[in-house]
Amino acid sequence: MATLQEIASQVRRDIVRMVHGAQSGHPGGSLGCADFLTALYFKTMEHDPSFNMEGKNENLFFLSNGHISPVFYSVLARSGYFDVKELATFRKINSRLQGHPATHEHLPGIRVASGSLGQGLSVAIGAALAKKLNGDDKLVYSLHGDGELNEGQIWEAIMFAAHHKVDNLISTVDWNGQQIDGPTEKVLNMGNLHEKFEVFGWHVLEMNGNDMDDVIAVLDKAKAASGQGKPVAIMMHTIMGKGVDFMENDHGWHGIAPNDEQLSKALAQLPETLGDY
């Protein structure tokens, strides 16, 4: 059985191959979040790949920064939601694997269209409150980009979740310090996100999102902190482009595709562990 690190390596291979194949997409943030989503779907969450849209009696995940769809699609396919071979259709005409996840394509694992930044936390809160009303004790997870926190709707949702004690929600912020136009501190400095969430009434944890052991440990801590009257936030430090040396810490790779030579260089750094699609 493959280790989580081996699965994450294959997920990274999928990401660069998908974006190269379409000559379009967002590799940087996808590579940075590969360890987190691998841990979430292969270790932490209780979820059913046979997929029921309502998701009763299972953990739910909502990707708010929907532009990192390559990592989401890879993890969904590798964990059994649909055939891995379908990854080859990414961003192609009539594909279910749109550039941003879309529900009208009926792709298993996708419960909300995302990519219009700032909306995912509101959706996750609604799902978490629905679970409370239905007596469902399973948790809801969400993922957000740090640049996404420029959106005002996020802060309205942060206030709402704390005020209404939505304590079955675990939201993670990919704090990589990069967004499409440059470093986040230069585009719009958000200051200390840990302190901001704390002041807004959340229980806040931090983790190294590119250290699998730390990811697992902090996700366990987050689960343990749930149900205590506060929503839980994880400030996840990652490296944009993690795993491909020429992409790392470079906001230029937020949304461009590698050429043939760059793809070869990237794949040479990423061990094939589960077999390419």
Image (cartoon, helix red, strand yellow):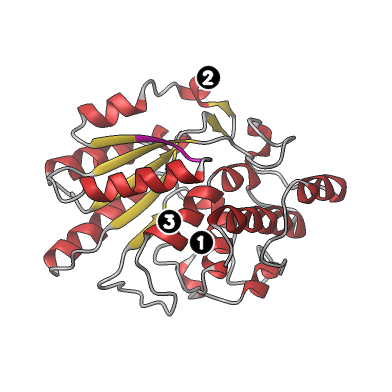
Mark nearer the N terminus (3 vs 2):
3
**Number of labelled discs?**
3
Principal secondary structure, stretch drawn in magenta: strand
Q: Which residue is painted at 52% across and 36% down in the image? A: 238
| Residue toward you, 164 or 59 | 59
The residue identified by callout 3 is: 40
Which label was assigned to residue 186?
Answer: 2
Task: Indicate the quadrant where residue 214 lies.
Answer: top left
Question: Which amino acid is tagged 1?
Answer: Pro
Say which element carries label 3.
helix
Task: Indicate the quadrant where residue 97 lies.
Answer: bottom right
Q: Position of residue 211 (x, y in %)?
A: 51, 40
The residue identified by callout 1 is: 101
Mark nearer the N terminus (3 vs 1):
3
| Residue toward you, 63 or 138 | 138
Q: Is residue 146 visible?
A: yes
Whether residue 155 is situated above or below residue 63 in the rendered picture: above
